[in-house]
Image (spheres, coloured by chain):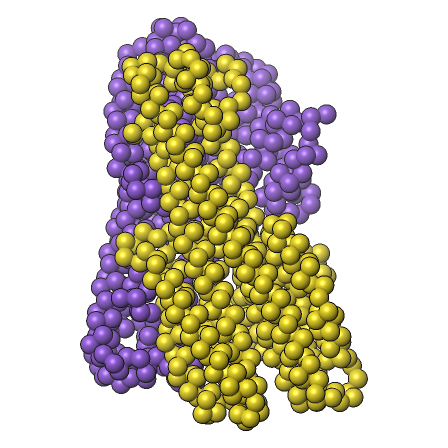
Chain colours: A purple, B yellow
Amino acid sequence: MKSALGFLVAAKRCEIHGLEQLEITSGLVKGVSELVHMLQKERGVSNVYLASAGRRFAAQRLERVEASVAAEAAARERFLQLDTDSGRMAGGVRLFSRIAYVLHGLDALPALRSRVAGRTLGVEEATRSFTELIAGLMAVVFEAADIAADPAVSRALVALFNFMQGKELAGQERAAGAAGFAAGHFEATEQQRLTHLIDAQDRCFQIFVEFADPTLRTIWRNAHTSPAIAEVERMRRIACAASTAPVAAEASERWFECTTSRIDAMRQVEDCATNALLHLCEAKLLEARSDLHDHKRFLDALSALGGQSAAPLAVFFDKSATSAPTPEGDATGLVEADGLSPKLGRSVLDLMQLQSQRLQDMSDELNTARAALNERKLVERAKGLLMSRRGLSEDEAYKLLRQTAMDQHRRLVDVAEATLSLAEFLKPD
Amino acid sequence: MKSALGFLVAAKRCEIHGLEQLEITSGLVKGVSELVHMLQKERGVSNVYLASAGRRFAAQRLERVEASVAAEAAARERFLQLDTDSGRMAGGVRLFSRIAYVLHGLDALPALRSRVAGRTLGVEEATRSFTELIAGLMAVVFEAADIAADPAVSRALVALFNFMQGKELAGQERAAGAAGFAAGHFEATEQQRLTHLIDAQDRCFQIFVEFADPTLRTIWRNAHTSPAIAEVERMRRIACAASTAPVAAEASERWFECTTSRIDAMRQVEDCATNALLHLCEAKLLEARSDLHDHKRFLDALSALGGQSAAPLAVFFDKSATSAPTPEGDATGLVEADGLSPKLGRSVLDLMQLQSQRLQDMSDELNTARAALNERKLVERAKGLLMSRRGLSEDEAYKLLRQTAMDQHRRLVDVAEATLSLAEFLKPD
C-alpha cells in the first residue's frame, strides 16, 4: 500500500476524513446559529423588560429564556460530539479555545438572567453581556469556516458567517433604534452609530452575496423585498434625519416590529443556508468516497499485474508520449481495456497530474475564501486599534479607514494592514 | 472534561499532537534534503560522464549512484513512518499527493540510470529528468512547511525551503556554467540563463536570511566568505562578460570545483538547519507538554472545589474587576494560594484571554511565514503563465514582471497576482 498509488489513496482518505469532520462542524455551526438567534431574541425582550422597569415583556422574557436554554442544551450537545480526546481534530487548537470561551460565558448566563429578573443591572450592561457572548459564538463559526479545506464548503461557510454577522448587526441596530425612538429623539452620536451599523450590515451582506450559491442568493433577494423592509428603510430615514423634531413615542413599537420581522426573515434565509451547508458536505463526501473506491480498484488492478508494474513507471521521465485526457473517475478503464504497460504508466501519471491540477485549483479557491475572512478580521482589528489609541468611535474609525483608502486609491484591507503595521506610531497623543 | 477548561485542555492536546506530527515531517524533510543533495551530485557526475562520452567520472558516477540509492532508501523509510492509514494527518491530502508523485519518479530512477550508463540519452534530457525529480522532492518540503501550525517551526521550515531552493538553483548554475566553459564560450541566451539563476538564488537566500534564526544566519554568513565564493564570483564575471573572447577549456574544471565546494558549504548550512529544526520541534513539544500538565492540575484543583466552581464563572460578564497579570504556566498558583471564588473565576478568564491573545499572535506570525511561501508560488506561476502564453524564456518572464513592478511602484507579488487574474487576456497572439 505504500506505493505511489498507495499514497494517492491515503491522500483521498485524508480528504474524506476532512469532509467527515466538516460535516460535524457544519452541524455545530447550525446549532450555534440557532443559539445565537435565541440569544438575540432574549437580548431584545430583556432590554424592553429592563427599560420599562419590568412592566413590559415579563412573560415574553420567560418564554425567551426557556427557548434559549433549549437551544443552549442542543448546542452543548454538538460541542460534546467533537473529537476532543484524540487531539487530532484539524484546527482543534483554535476551535476548542473559542468553544472554551463560549462555555465559560454560557456557564455565567444563569447569574446574568437573575440580575435581569431582579433588575439589578442597566439596559446597556445587559446588552453588552449578551452581545459579548454572541460575539464569542460568532468566533466559533469563524474558526469552523477557517478550518474548511474544501473550497465549496469553505465558500458556503464564509457566506454563512457573513450572513450571521450581518444579522447580528441588524439586531444591534434594532436595539439602538428602539432606544432612540423610545427616548423621542436621536443624538448625533446615536445617529452615527445607526449609520455605522447599517453600513457594516451592507458590507456583510455583500460578501454573503459574493460567496453564497445562486439558490441562496435568490432566497435572500426575495426575503429582501418584503413590506417590512420598506418600513425599516422609512424609519431609518426618520431616525437619521438632520431634523431635531421629536419622533412619536409609539414609533418605538413600530420600529421594534418591523426590524423584528426583517430579522425573522433573515433567520429563514440563515436556516436555508445551514441546511444547504449540511447537504453540500454530504454530497462532497459521497463524491470523495466514490473516488476512493475507483482509486482502490485501479490499485488492485495494478497489483494484479504484479512484476509488470515496475517497468511502465519509467514513462515518468518520458513526457513526450501523447496521452488522451483521462477523467479521474474513469482511470480503471485503462487497466480493464488493455494491459499495455506504457499506457498504464501514462495513466498513473495522468492521475497524478490531474490530482496536482486539482490541488492547485482548490488551493486558489480556498485562498480566495479565506482572504475574505481575513480581510474582515484585519479591518476589525485596525478599527479597534484606532478606537483604543486615538479615542475614536467605531464609526469614526471605520470612516477614517475608508476615507484614507479612497484618497489613496487603495483597498480598504491594505489600509487596515498598513494601520496595524504602524501600531507603534499610533500611541495616544 | 467537557467544561470550558476541558476544552482548553483539548486545545492544548491538539497543539501537542500537531507538534508531534511536525517532528515527524521535520525528520522527513531532513531525509528529503539528504536525498536531494545526493541526486544533485549524481546529476552533476552523470552530466560530465555523458558529455565526455563516458570517458570521465565513470567510477565516480557508480559511487554517486550508490550514495543516492542509500539516501533514497532512508527517505522511503521516512515516508513509511507517516500515518497514511487513519486519514487523519493534517495537510495529508497535499503532502501525500506530492509524495505519490515523488515515489512514482523514484520508481523510474533505475531505468533512467540504465540509459545514462548506456549513454542512450543526451546531457539535457538527463539533467531535465533529475531536475524534475528534485523539483518533486522540493514540493514535498513546501507542503511540510505549509502544514506547520507553529509559527517558530513554520519560520524555520520557510527558511529551510528557501535555502534548499537556492542550493538547487546553485546546482543548476553549476551545470549551465560547466557546459559553457566546456564549449569555450557563452551564447547570449546562456548568459541570460546564468544571470537568471544567480538572481533567483539571491532572492531565495534573502528570504532564508529573513526567516532563519540568528545562529543559522551567522553560520551562513561565515560559509559565504570562503575563498571558493570569491572564485565563483570571478568566474561568473568571465562567463557573463560581454566580450566574445573564448574562455580556456580547462576553466570548466575550475568552475566545477569552485561551484562544488560552494555547494558543499551550503550542504553544511543545510545540515545545521535541518538539525536545528528537529531540536526546535523537541523544545516546542516539551513546552506544550508542560503547559498541558499545568492545565490539568488547574482543572483538577477546580474539580476539587466541586459545586463552588459554577458561581465564580459569573465574572465572565464582569470585566471591571481588576486582576493581576497571570503567567499562563503559573495558573495553578491561584488555586493553591487561596480558594477565593471570584479570584479563581478571574484566573480562568485570564487564562482564556491569554490563550486568545496567543492565538492571535500565532496567527499573525503564521500568516507572515505562509505569505512568503505563497508569494514565491505566485511569482513562479505568473512566470510560467507568461512563458507558456507569450513564449517568453524564464528569464524574460521574470524581468517583465520585475520591470512592471518597478514602473508601477508595486510589489512583485501584486504584479504576479494581477498577471494570474488576467490569464484570459494573455492568450497567445
Q: Position of residue A188 (x, y in %)?
A: 60, 20
Above or below residue B153? Residue B294 is above
From the viewer's perspective, tell me whether residue B88 is left or right of residue B285: left
Q: Position of residue B21 (x, y in %)?
A: 39, 50
Q: Position of residue B114 (x, y in %)?
A: 42, 87
Pick the quarter of the image with the C terminus of chain A: top right
Q: Quadrant of residue A245?
A: top right
Task: Please tell me which residue lies in front, A114 or B89.
Answer: B89
From the viewer's perspective, tell me whether residue A294 is left or right of residue A258: left
Above or below residue B19? Residue B337 is above
Q: Quadrant of residue B246?
A: bottom right
Inspect this view and state whether residue B100 appears: yes
Q: In the image, what residue occupies the spot 22% across and 79% down?
A: A305
> Exactly how many numbered labels are in the figure?
0
Q: Quadrant of residue A167?
A: top left
Q: Position of residue A298 (x, y in %)?
A: 24, 71
Pick the quarter of the image with the N terminus of chain A: bottom left
Inspect this view and state whether residue B374 appears: no
Task: Please tell me which residue lies in front, A290 or B264.
Answer: B264
Q: In the image, what residue occupies the spot 28% across and 12% down?
A: A59
Q: In the image, what residue occupies the spot 26% across and 19% down?
A: A66
Above or below residue A108? Residue A31 is below
Q: In the image, what residue occupies the spot 64% across and 40% down?
A: A421
